[in-house]
Image (cartoon, grey):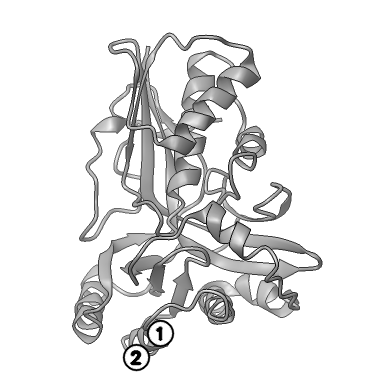
Amino acid sequence: MDFCVRVPGSCGELLQGWHRGEPFLVTCPIARYTTVEASSAFQGREGLGEKAERAFSMILSCLGVQEFPYGLRLRSELPQGKGMASSSADIAAVVAAVSYALQRPLTPRQILALAVQIEPTDATFLPGIVRLNQVNGRILAVYDHLPYLPVSIFDTGGTIATADFYRLNAQKKEERDWSDVLLRLQQGERGLAAAAVQSALWQEKFLPKRCLRQLLEEAKALGALGITAAHSGTVLGVLWPLSMTKAQILSGVSRLRCFLPQLTYRGTTAMRSGGIEIDVKGKGSKDKDRSEGDEKDGNSSFCAWRQYL
């Protein structure tokens, strides 16, 4: 028994805030992954952090199982504390791998119910792009028609612990009318980018990011549509139109790196549908970490990857 599951990370969130009395976020899944290999060829657990270990214990308890008879190995392309959904991807990938290995696979929505017991979740393991209450797991909308734009990731520095951020900011609730922004989100490439920019600017009141406005201005001058931000993290993403070629994007990135050397470039990738994927041939764990450069869209790297459920 050998297989791998993988879950995409994110470049922050497209939107995040308070609307109609509850917190919400709109996911921004990208082609960067946590991969978990389950195998009978080795024993024990490798690479699981604290939250992934909690998820491992929770799924065994949920299934009423005392021992897990296989080895687990977790590898991630997602740096921690940056707002790239590393913990959410780790949690979901571990739960999916364990439940699948025990022939009792949980659906993404069942995994969501477990994930929010550990911390507020980015929920990139839900198919499509999703608006949800990240604290209690209530799904508010599913968007299956939004464009998946190229995104270049820039890090403003430092790290932020998701659970600590939510605890410290629990009283900083600012109710806004998001109706127009939510409508704009669904109006093509430019609408999505404009909505993401508005959300990023509103978040500056709570978690300011150095160079956000300068990055936005310079990027748009180079043909970008806008930016997305990690609302409880440190990264910013430059959103490029689908009509731009790879060479044009790389040229724009090169100029941005010259204009803003104080930001750390973490590569260019693409938005994609969220969800969990499985490789029953067990080759997915050979994927290489990508912290620099440009990547494929995440759907063609391994022909063996298919939807988990």
**Quadrant of the rendered structure where residue 44 is?**
top left
Answer with mark 2 or mark 1, whichever residue precedes in sequence: 1
**Residue 165 appears left or right of 215:** right
Check if mark 2's residue and mark 1's residue have beta carbons within 8 Å. no
- What residue lies at 48% left-to-right and 16% top-to-bottom? 101
Residue 253 horizontal/vertical position (percent): 25, 76
Between 224 and 163, the one nearer to me in the picture: 163
Q: Is residue 70 above or below residue 108?
A: above
**Residue 293 appears left or right of 175:** left
Asked whether residue 147 is in view, the answer is no
Between 89 and 187, the one nearer to me in the picture: 89
* Local SS, label 1: helix
- The residue type indicated by label 2 comes to Ala
Q: Which residue is mark 2?
A: 221
**Quadrant of the rendered structure where residue 259 is?**
bottom left
- The residue type indicated by label 1 comes to Leu
Q: Which residue is mark 1?
A: 216
> Which one is in front in this view, the residue at disc 2 or the one at disc 1?
1
Q: Quadrant of the N terminus?
A: top left
Q: Quadrant of the C terminus?
A: top right
- What residue lies at 40% left-to-right and 71% top-to-bottom? 236
Q: Is residue 119 above or below residue 187?
A: above
**Quadrant of the rendered structure where residue 27 is?**
bottom right
- What residue lies at 46% left-to-right and 45% top-to-bottom? 87
Residue 108 horizontal/vertical position (percent): 60, 36
CA gap between label 2 and label 1 equals 9 Å
